[in-house]
Image (cartoon, rainbow, N blue to C red):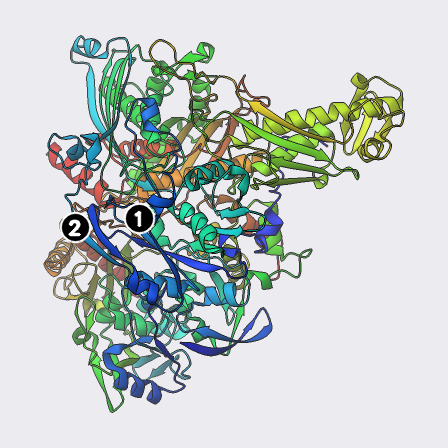
Amino acid sequence: MISKEYRFEAPRDLGQALSLLEKHGDDAKILAGGMSLMPTMTLGLVQPDVVISLNHIPNLDYIKEEGNLLKIGALTRHDTVRKSELVKKHCPLLAEAASFIGDVQVRHRGSIGGSIAHADPAADYPPVMLTLGAQFKLQKAKGERTVPATAFFKDLMQTALEPGELVTEIQIPKLPDGAGSAYLRLHRVEGNFAIVAAAAVVEKGFRSARLGLAGVGPKAVLVDVTARLKGGVTDAALKGVREDALKASADAYGDLNGDADYRRAMAQVYAERAVRTAAGRVR
Amino acid sequence: MKQVGRSVPGLPNRLLVSGHGTYVADVSLPGMCAMAVLRSPYAHARIVSIDTSRALAAPGVVYVLTGEEIARETNPIPPVADPGLYGGKSLAVRALPTDRARYVGEPVAVVVAEDRYTANRALELVDVEWEELPVVSDAEAALAPGSPLVEPSWGDNVMMHKEFTRGDARAALAAAGGRVVRGVVKAQRYVAAPIEPRAYAASWDAYAEQLTVWSSTQNPHPLRVFIAETLGIPETMIRVIQPHVGGGFGQKVPTFPEEIAVAYLARKLGRPVKWIEERTEHFLAGGHAREEVLSFEAAYGPDGRVTALDVRIVADVGAPATFVGWAMSYVTAYCVPAAYKIPHCRVELFTAVTNKCPWNGYRAFGKEAASFLMDRVMDRVADATGIDRVEVRLRNFIQPDEFPYSQVSGAMLDSGDYPRALRRVRELIGAEGFPEEQREARRQGRYLGLGFGFELTPEGCSLPHTTMLSGYDGATVRVAPDGHVTILTGVTSPGSGNETGIAQLVADTLGVGLDHVRVLQGDTDTCPYGLGNYSSRSLMIGGSAAKIAAIELREKMFKVAAKALEVNPGDLDAEDGQIFVQGAPTRRIPVRDVASLVYRHAYGPEASEVEPALESTRYFRIGNVHHQPEVQGRFSAYPTWPSGACAAVVEVDRDTGFVKVLRYAIVHDSGPIVNPMMAHGNLHGGVAQGLGGALYEHMVYDDAGQLRTGSFMDYTIPTAVEMPHCEIEMQETASPFTLTGCKGVGESGVTGPLGAVASAVENAFPELNLALMETPLMPHRVWRALRDAEAGRS
Amino acid sequence: MKVPVKVTVNKKPYSVEVDTRMILADMLRDVLRLTGTHIGCGTGSCGACTVMLNGETVKSCSILAADVDGQEVTTIEGVSNGANQLHPVQEAFVQHQGLQCGYCTPGMILSAIQLLKENPNPSESDIRHGIAGNLCRCTGYQFIVESIQAAAKAGVKV
């Protein structure tokens, strides 16, 4: 149980939340869905002096389209992402990945912004964000900026977020017509963390082919395999994809799910499967 | 309508589905304070000093208890089964230590505060000065000369060394020529992980001089004995209540340090005290199981008959404790060679202590390792001879007409028909059509495998000279003046449903409907002395006691009814609330009217010759338990021997090692079944735990004795998605030794998956000659085995 | 540190003060004395603490009591209509032995209701995935699946 005392703040608008965050800095933790934060607090691994809940701020939970972008509010719950007609239409890869996160209850509460800010190396969104070329709106009390996913995930659970900054919006370019995508992951039991995960997008005519891998190092990795698939999904092409995946897993770690060799092998297996499946879904 | 044999829904179901059960954590009393436990962060360390002053000074803290006071004010906790009585080493253990902590998570001090938050917070204010000691983190290393000692007074790390022999295995192996298979089977460290963690509460009434203890336990009466002895107060001063329990599986048998602490503190402080375990504490200190290495050599003939078996078992039971878990290692050795007849057999057991959490009881209690071993031996012999795996087993089984059969250890196996069960499960799983299914799958690039297992799961464990482990139990049956029946049992149900089965037995005996029967369990003030629930004894032993008591009341009521109907008692029968004349059912009298005559007309013509009231307390002692050791110092501890033949079909992802169980079947034999739905439900649960052991669950320590799997995220028990559809069929070979013929179902299903799944995964790649001898078969392990085998071939 | 919380639980409004450290599960159990919601792990894995928050199942051990101000919670106690009128899903669990020790059961039933709300005719796979966030150690899940199938077949209105 949580034993250290703390102040609980439930700001009613984003500006208030950002001011609080600026004021308290490292003494504060942001509470969105809480699916990552709460267990760490219960286990005593994280002991903030202030908890700032974003759950009472209206208008942080939305999915809309603006031109070529899908814009998703940070407090949008995974289940909403999973079921959204807009998401299913314009970046089904994201809906597919969201369907793997945790379980029904976790998906009802966990938020896309919270998950991204947490940047677990085995999390489902980061490889998808890399593959889709997403960018994130980061806001602080004075100012905002937009950072591409490729620059956002820096290291093991480290992101580009500066003190006082919050992820407030996820912006994802719509996939071009006919693109195929796939999200696949290996896990020990249902609902458990991914051992390895692969997100793939293959555009019509193999104009572009990208792979996002998770569980292969301290952070998710983007692998551009367009060159490999120039001539289509041939044995040679897939061999090349596997080589790229192996290279991308140079920093693979070992744990209770297997040693680094195993992860590197799984990275190759899942990279190939994700690319094949995505290519098969090209229309 | 007769109730026995009907699939009656559990009697507590309506209460529990509506969330109105009472578990210990739900108990709330005025003035109740909260307890928190300070646990050792080290696997092995000397307690140099404990300073409680900062904690005591914190607002809201009521008390801090350490080993020093425990040593002064309490006695060592009586062990459930003292290894010293069976040729092993004993150790006096108190609720809190004064000298050393011997595993990470061992309770070292206890804080009591006004609320849980304050109690937890105050743990950080207890200042313990530690001196780290060398850690023994591996059983083989523990046995090596020169190893650091877990218990210095022992001189080594061997709690028990035992050998069971028949014939001369070494000579037979030497004479076997090349026909010997060898291997090392490894079963992993496991934890029961019921969904309800442990919880205890206690309250002391100074005027009535009564200590009431609520415990999430399986054995309230024995717990009372142990608490009384530990606290040095008469048993008559203690009431133990077992409310609803959220699963026990053997892990919630007495006696935990936290139970003693709660009881002691309630009395000392004069205020109720409650402790609710955090799940992390459960993983650290709730009691583990099963970590065994079994090295074997087996000689076989060209016909696949195993002529000799030599097994060396090393069990890593963690630190010495008062828990009964160490006995599981003994039971493994005791059960070898399980369902098979082997003329020359030598089983050597080393029960090693290490600086890890002690074992406590866990479902299958060591029998699983014995059957897992034999499954692997039989499969290796099948590989070596080219004889079909099922056929090899059929040739080595103890045959149906050879019972009662005396096994190598002295165990007396009561009855069974193993060949029939195995043949039947082969049909159930569709073995005949499987090769084609397998070929078709291969054409699609999928790898399917079929494997078999056979489990022998003796029940009713009775060891000489123990408070808790004995083959008797009691029940009180009462018929009230209005004809309603109350049953009070000495056995308990942590969710397994024996209360319903017992109600069915008694309802049929007294001829009343189930809606007229109430079962009360788990209160030492009202229930007759009993040993509680473990080793699947509750229905077979507790049910027998209830039946005997009910028969006594039936006979009394028939005497009264006979007078009323002017017939002989022998002409009567009872059903659906009526006592009637056989063959002339319109001549009858309601049970309620008979009860009324007994209670209200005690001097009248019908009831004047029977003793007043309708209440009977009777005990049943099961046969086939032999505790007077014969020549070789053996005893027969298990009266009944349920068995089960299992089969699994798996799909293996060749590239990742991921195993999915597609379907599972078990033909199970526990004798007559009182409630098929309950029995099936228990089996489904057992199979789930077994599959967890085969594929998903592993308690892992590092070399420093730190636990790496401290939550459900790392210790992954199966979800609904992992579970295959499971086909169950019952075979009924009655036990000649219980009143009902029942043998107990509670531990069945858990063992078979280990061998069946390993065999199935091997079978998916017959060209690779895989030998998967170690569980759990997690993806990375299977992957490594596949890659090594492929490399070996090329 | 305490904060005020206004929350509706099982259609009844409550106004309470809770320690900021208190999780929703403990508020329900210790402050409101609704002990049907159980805690099995405290870290969001086992699902025994499942309740509905604003009509959707969540794990109440991983939500702060302070954070449900102004919201609506349904617990197992709010599912049946008194002791003699169980919800059809509860009735199905009773008849098909979808429980043994009962500890995971309240959370399991809430998840079953959630599933049938969204998918009145679930396949067996849908059911198993729908309850994957609820661990059970007693039943092996088979009778739980059958209970939910029975409830679906009876066309229960959740």
Q: Which one is in front, C80 or B304? A: C80
Vertical side of B161 occupied by B42: above or below:
below
Separation of residues labelled 2 and 1 (CA atoms): 18 Å
- The answer to the question of whether label 2 and label 1 lie on touching residues, with beta carbons closer than 8 A, is no
Quadrant position of the N terminus of chain A in the picture: bottom left
Q: Which one is in front, B150 or C110? A: B150
Q: Residue at x 25, y 91 (%)?
A: A142
Q: Residue at x 18, y 40 (%)?
A: B136
Residue B131 bears which disc, if any? Answer: 2
Q: Going from the N terminus, do you reach mark 2 or mark 1 first? A: 1
Q: Amino acid at mark 1?
A: Glu
The chain holding disc 1 is B
Circle 1: element type: helix
Q: Amino acid at mark 2?
A: Glu
Would residue B712 be visible to someone looking at this image? no
User: In which quadrant of the rendered view does residue A43 lie?
Assistant: bottom left
Q: In the image, is B660 to the left or to the right of A215?
A: right
Q: Residue at x 28, y 60 (%)?
A: B126
Q: Badge 2, how many Cα within 10 Å: few under 14, some, many 20+?
A: few
Q: Badge 1, how many Cα within 10 Å: few under 14, some, many 20+?
A: some
Q: In the image, is A211 to the left or to the right of B666?
A: left
Q: Which one is in front, A236 or C145? A: C145
Q: Position of residue A159 (x, y in %)?
A: 20, 73
Task: Write down the residue under mark 1.
Answer: B68
User: In which quadrant of the rendered view does residue B169 lie?
Assistant: top left
Would residue B635 be visible to someone looking at this image? yes
